Amino acid sequence: MGILPGWGWLFLPVCQALVVPREVSGQIGETLSLRCWYPRGYESYNKYWCRGASRDSCRKVVETAGREVPRQHGRVSIQDSYIFCVVLLTVENLSKEDAGSYWCGVEKTGRDMMEPVTVKVIPGKPWCPAGWSLGREKTSSSPLTSSPGGPAMSTLVPSVVLLSLLAAAG
Ligand SMILES: *[C@@H]1O[C@H](CO)[C@@H](O)[C@H](O)[C@H]1NC(C)=O
């Protein structure tokens, strides 16, 4: 099983606490995977992936059932690996709607252990940054020179100064 590419995990506080990446990102259409480390002693407890901003109201997407066999729900799967005390989560064919807040959880008596993860989805194709066309519009507009003060001046003045500097340099 390709659960541990490389030996980087050796330097993590493995098997001592619930450790997850704060944020993971993937491109649309790709497979996103992340690892969730849990403390020793919780090997036989169920682990799950929960979606929602709050730990108390998130919805479970997929959950293990006390065994190492992978469980799958749609494009999302979860697999527990007892030896390394790690849970592998994968989301296939990532879509924009998958972005958001999630939790990796360990079911136990009392309050579950849960740690938040933010999933970011990057558009697959390169796209034009929004500021680009805005910048061009500013260039073509006539420069304002009068009436200091007013809320607009605080943003206009720096860009006018910048444009003058660019004009002087070119
Ligand atoms: C991936 O998801 C898109 C919709 O988000 C769907 O149209 C496409 O068929 C899916 N591809 C695969 C390989 O499942």
Image (tube, helix red, strand yellow):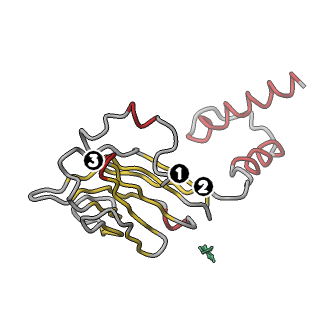
**Nearer to us in this view, 157 or 55:** 55
> According to the image, label 3 marks what residue?
38
Residue at (78%, 38%) from the top-left corner?
143
| Left or right, residue 147 beside residue 58 | right
Q: Earlier in the sequence, mark 1 or mark 3?
A: 1
Q: How far is disc 1 from disc 3 in space, using C-alphas?
A: 21 Å
Q: Which residue is mark 2?
A: 122
Local packing at callout 3 (Cα closer than 10 Å; few below 14, some 14-19, many 20+) is many
In the picture provided, is 4 more to the left or to the right than 61?
right
Seen from this angle, which residue lies furthest left?
110
Q: Mark 3 is on which residue type? A: Tyr
Ligand 1 sits in quadrant: bottom right
User: Does the CB distance between marks 1 and 3 fall below 8 Å?
Assistant: no
Task: Determine the residue positioned at 27% across, 57% down.
Answer: 105
Q: Are marks 3 and 2 in contact (CB under 8 Å)?
A: no
Graded by Cα atoms within 10 Å as few (under 14), some (14 to 19) or many (20 or more), the crowding at tag 1 reads some
The circle drawn on residue 25 is 1
Write down the quadrant of residue 102 in the picture: bottom left
Task: State the image coordinates of residue 115 (x, y, percent, origin top left).
Answer: 29, 50
User: Which of the 4 image quadrants contains residue 72?
Assistant: bottom left
Does mark 2's beta carbon lie closer than 8 Å to ligand 1?
Answer: no
**Residue 117 appears at what percent x and percent y?**
38, 51
In depth, the one of 54 and 157 nearer the eye is: 54
Quarter of the picture holding the C terminus: top right
